[in-house]
Image (tube, rainbow, N blue to C red):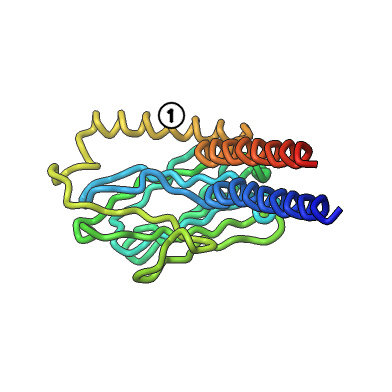
């Protein structure tokens, strides 16, 4: 009887351990995906890059109604990309450069749907070899989240609850006129931006999540279930 109780106790402890590990395996990648991301995460000084800010979550389940992006010092200009589903307003500094761009959703974006907004950003040459933060305020039907945290020296950015999107600016572009170009190049760039914006707008209507997080969660789920089955089978055989 004592041996049977001991085996039962060990089995319960193993099941609890497997369950806890399964929760961590699923929760960690999902938590990592619950941020506002910026792509690309790198740019060249003295050049223009199209930055896209994306998200696939609301505020504790509440749908997103607006996304406000603060423009850091060192940005020579920021031109929002017009795209369907969003109304855009700008706050301008004394030099005419936007200090904040607000994208208001024409229809609130439900939690679990992926959406994105974009802007063309000119990085001044003085920003070479630095990292610029683009703080984002996500406003929802109920509540808001300020993605404004910046890691201090020695702190792991992944430990932050609400990190600000970061762009690492490299050396000055070889072409001093990078990001400007002639009229024809500008026309092509405008067409490409419009196409990208249209794709981003379509993405808002399709349920999506970070693919890496999805695969990691699926792998963790499969491993956890397999381990649980092995524990139960061994427990029955010993009984």
Residue 141: x %, y % from top left:
70, 54
Query: On screen, 134 above or below 177?
Result: below
Residue 48: quadrant of the picture: top left
Residue 150: quadrant of the picture: bottom left
Say whether residue 214 is left or right of residue 140.
left
The residue positioned 32% from the left and 64% from the top of the image is 73
Query: On screen, 123 above or below 174?
Result: below
The C terminus, quarter of image:
top right
Residue 122: x %, y % from top left:
29, 50
Residue 8: x %, y % from top left:
79, 50
Q: Can residue 65 be seen in this view?
A: no
The residue positioned 30% from the left and 54% from the top of the image is 168
> From this viewpoint, which residue is outermost toward the bottom?
153
Q: Nearer the viewer, residue 49 or 84?
A: 49
> From this viewpoint, which residue is outermost toward the right?
1
Q: Residues within 10 Å of mark 1 (few under 14, many from 20)?
A: few
Q: Can residue 202 be seen in this view?
A: yes
Q: Is mark 1 on a helix, strand or loop?
A: helix
Query: On screen, 103 above or below 181?
Result: below
Say whether residue 65 is left or right of residue 8.
left
Residue at numbered disc 1? 195
């Amino acid at each position: 009887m004592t041996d049977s109780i001991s085996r039962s106790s060990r089995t319960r402890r193993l099941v609890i351990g497997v369950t806890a590990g399964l929760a961590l395996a699923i929760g960690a990648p999902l938590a990592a995906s619950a941020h506002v991301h910026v792509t690309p995460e790198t740019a060249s000084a003295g050049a223009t890059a199209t930055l896209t800010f994306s998200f696939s979550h609301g505020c504790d389940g509440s749908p997103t109604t607006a996304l406000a992006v603060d423009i850091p010092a060192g940005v020579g200009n920021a031109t929002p990309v017009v795209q369907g589903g969003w109304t855009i307003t700008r706050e301008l500094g004394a030099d005419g450069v936007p200090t904040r761009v607000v994208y208001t959703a024409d229809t609130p974006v439900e939690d679990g749907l992926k959406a994105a907004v974009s802007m063309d950003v000119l990085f001044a040459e003085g920003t070479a070899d630095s990292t610029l933060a683009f703080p984002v305020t996500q406003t929802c039907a109920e509540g808001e989240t300020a993605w404004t945290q910046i890691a201090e020296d020695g702190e792991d950015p992944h430990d932050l609850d609400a990190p600000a999107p970061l762009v690492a600016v490299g050396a000055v572009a070889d072409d001093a006129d990078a990001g400007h170009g002639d009229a024809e190049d500008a026309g092509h760039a405008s067409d490409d931006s419009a196409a990208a914006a249209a794709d981003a707008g379509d993405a808002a209507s399709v349920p999506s999540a970070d693919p890496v997080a999805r695969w990691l969660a699926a792998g963790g789920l499969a491993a956890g279930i397999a381990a649980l089955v092995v524990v139960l089978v061994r427990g029955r055989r010993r009984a």
